[in-house]
Image (cartoon, rainbow, N blue to C red):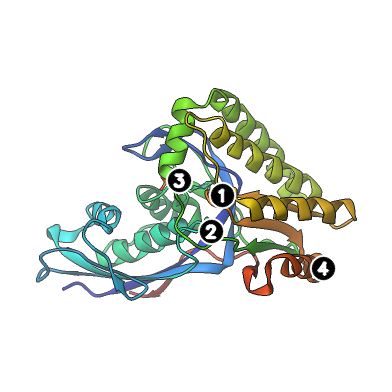
C-alpha cells in the first residue's frame, strides 16, 4: 500500500474559452484559452494505491461510483499507476457538480496532484498541468492560481498552462448565479465536438480566440476592467454561437440565463460596470469590481433569491494537504 496523498484544486472560469479539441487522444485543444481560478469552488481528493485491491474504488461526495461512472477516473489513473496497482480515490466536490461551474476542472486538477503524489512522483506544476489535461481540458488551467493561460501547443509536451498573474492585486470578483444545479443534457465533450464538426462558424471562432487573447493580456496587465469585461463577454457569446449554429443546434441557456444577461445589461446602462459569461450550462457568472458587489448581489438576489447568488474572488493554485 502506498501512502495516501491529498490535493486541493480550485475551479476556474474561462475569460477566453476552450471549445473544441484538435486531438481527442492526446486532449489537444483547437485554440489556447485563458481563465481566472476562483476561491469558492474546489475539490479535495485523496488517492492511495493498494496491491490488495482488485479494482479502483472511487467515492465522490460519500457516494461510491459504479465502474461505469468512474471510467474517466480509471483511465486517468492508468497514466500513473505504480506496478499496475489499483487505487482508493475519495473526492469531495465543493462545487455544484456538472452545473456549468466547471467541476471537472477542479476534479481532474486535484486528481492529478493526489494520484501523482500517491504514485511517488514529485511533478512540477507544468508537469501537473500536462497530466491534468488528460483528464479534462479545463483542468490544465486549474493547477495555477489567478489568471492562467493554456497554450494549445502541438503535442503532449507543449500543451500546458502557465500563470499570467497569480496574485491578482486587483479588486475584482465573480458573482456566480446558480440558476440550475442539475446535470447538463449535452456534456461539454459532446457539445464541443459537435461544434467543431458541424458549425460553419468554427473557422471564424479560431480567429476570434487569437484576437481576444492578444487583446485581453494587456487589459489584465494594466487592470483595464472595462476592456477585459468587453472581451470576456463577447468571447462567451461567440462560443455559444457555436452551439446555436451546430447541426443539430443546441443551447446551454435557459430562461433565467437570459433574464440574468438582461439584468447585467441594465446595471451597465445605469453605470455599474459588470460583464457576464456562461459555460456549458445555464449558470451565469458576472465579473465585477469589489466596490460594486453590494449593488450587484442585491439586484441578483431580488431576481433569483440570495441562496442562488455566490460571491467568489481570485483563488490559489493546487495545494497538497498531505502526502
Ligand atoms: C472552458 N469549458 O474554457 C470551456 C468553456 C466549458 C465552456 O472547458 O472534454 O470539461 O473534459 O476537455 O474541460 C468544459 O469542458 O471538457 C470547458 P473536456 P471540459 O472552461
Lower sequence index among marks 3 and 1: 3
Determine the image quadrant of residue 291.
bottom right
Pointer 3 residue Cβ closer than 8 Å to ligand 1:
yes
> Pointers 2 and 1 in contact (CB under 8 A)?
yes
Quick one: quadrant of the N terminus?
bottom left
Q: Secondary structure at mark 1?
A: loop
Residue placed most toward the observer, 152 or 221:
152
Q: Residue 97 location in percent, x, y?
A: 45, 63
Q: Residues within 10 Å of mark 2 (few under 14, many from 20)?
A: many
Q: Residues within 10 Å of mark 4 (few under 14, many from 20)?
A: few
Is residue 242 shown above or below 319?
A: above
> Pointers 4 and 2 in contact (CB under 8 A)?
no
Pointer 1 residue Cβ closer than 8 Å to ligand 1:
yes
Residue that carries the numbered disc 4 in the rendered image: 295
**Image side of residue 49 versus residue 291, left or right:** left
Q: Is residue 223 visible?
A: no
Residue that carries the numbered disc 2 in the rendered image: 101
> Pointers 3 and 1 in contact (CB under 8 A)?
yes
Give me the C-alpha separation between circle 4 and circle 1: 24 Å
Q: Which mark is on residue 279?
A: 1
Q: Residues within 10 Å of mark 3 (few under 14, many from 20)?
A: some
Amino acid at each position: 500500500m502506498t501512502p495516501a496523498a491529498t490535493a486541493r484544486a480550485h475551479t476556474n472560469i474561462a475569460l477566453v474559452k476552450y471549445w473544441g479539441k484538435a486531438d481527442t487522444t492526446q486532449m489537444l485543444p483547437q485554440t489556447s484559452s485563458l481563465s481566472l481560478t476562483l476561491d469558492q469552488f474546489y475539490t479535495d481528493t485523496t488517492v492511495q494505491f493498494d496491491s490488495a485491491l482488485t479494482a479502483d474504488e472511487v467515492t465522490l461526495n460519500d457516494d461510491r461510483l459504479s465502474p461505469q461512472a468512474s471510467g474517466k477516473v480509471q483511465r486517468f489513473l492508468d497514466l500513473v499507476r505504480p506496478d499496475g496497482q489499483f487505487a482508493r480515490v475519495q473526492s469531495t466536490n465543493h462545487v455544484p457538480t456538472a452545473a456549468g461551474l466547471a467541476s471537472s476542472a477542479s476534479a481532474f486538477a486535484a486528481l492529478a496532484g493526489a494520484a501523482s503524489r500517491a504514485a511517488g512522483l514529485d511533478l512540477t506544476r507544468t508537469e501537473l498541468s500536462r497530466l491534468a489535461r488528460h483528464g479534462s481540458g479545463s483542468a490544465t488551467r486549474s493547477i495555477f492560481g489567478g489568471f492562467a493561460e493554456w497554450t494549445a501547443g502541438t503535442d503532449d509536451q507543449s500543451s500546458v498552462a502557465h500563470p499570467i498573474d497569480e496574485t491578482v492585486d486587483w479588486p475584482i470578483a465573480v458573482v456566480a448565479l446558480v440558476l440550475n444545479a442539475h446535470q447538463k443534457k449535452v456534456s461539454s465533450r459532446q457539445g464541443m465536438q459537435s461544434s467543431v464538426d458541424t458549425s460553419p462558424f468554427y473557422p471564424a471562432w479560431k480567429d476570434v480566440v487569437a484576437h481576444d487573447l492578444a487583446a485581453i493580456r494587456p487589459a489584465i496587465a494594466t487592470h483595464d476592467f472595462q476592456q477585459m469585461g468587453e472581451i470576456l463577454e463577447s468571447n462567451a457569446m461567440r462560443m455559444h454561437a457555436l452551439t446555436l449554429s451546430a447541426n443539430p443546434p443546441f443551447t446551454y441557456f435557459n430562461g433565467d440565463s437570459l433574464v440574468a444577461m438582461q439584468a447585467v445589461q441594465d446595471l451597465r446602462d445605469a453605470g455599474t460596470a459588470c460583464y457576464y459569461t456562461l459555460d456549458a450550462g445555464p449558470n451565469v457568472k458576472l465579473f465585477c469590481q469589489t466596490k460594486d458587489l453590494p449593488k450587484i448581489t442585491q439586484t441578483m438576489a431580488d431576481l433569483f433569491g440570495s441562496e442562488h447568488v455566490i460571491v467568489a474572488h481570485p483563488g490559489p493554485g493546487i495545494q497538497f494537504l498531505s502526502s
